[in-house]
Amino acid sequence: RELASYNINVNVVAPHAIETDMSREWSEEKRKSIIADIPLARLGEPEDIAEAVAFLVSDKAKFITGEVLDVNGGCLMD
């Protein structure tokens, strides 16, 4: 709220399991277990996160502030 008067929007992108160098080190068992809990049945890609950030910094999101955007393939649904 403090920054809204300065026309500054504050939002957060909260990713789930993303295909990265770190996730490639997981055992096949761990990978399958995590993917089994994701309704879209895959790990996210870095591009999935980048697209979410690109949206939030665009004019299309100019009336969005104070939000957490879960980018998780449906793993956590409110």
Image (cartoon, rainbow, N blue to C red):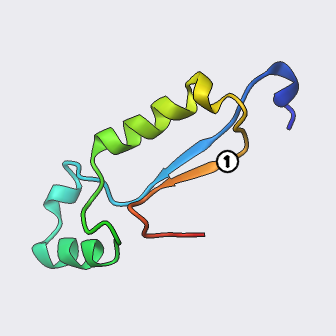
Residue under the point 19% across and 76% down: 32
| Residue 67 relative to residue 25: left or right | right
Residue 57's place in the image compared with 41, above or below, is above
- Near-viewer residue (74 or 11): 74
Q: Residue furthest left?
A: 28
Relative to 58, is 21 above or below?
A: below
Disc 1 target residue: 67
Quadrant where the C terminus sits is bottom right
- Does residue 6 appear to the left or right of 50 in the view shown? right
User: What amino acid is at disc 1?
Assistant: Glu
Question: Where does the image place residue 44, in percent across and percent down from the top left?
Answer: 30, 54
The answer to whether 46 appears left or right of 77 in the picture is left
Residue at 23% across, 53% down: 22
Q: Left of 3 or right of it: where is 12?
A: left
The secondary structure type at the circle numbered 1 is loop
At 56% from the left and 34% from the top, the residue drawn is 56
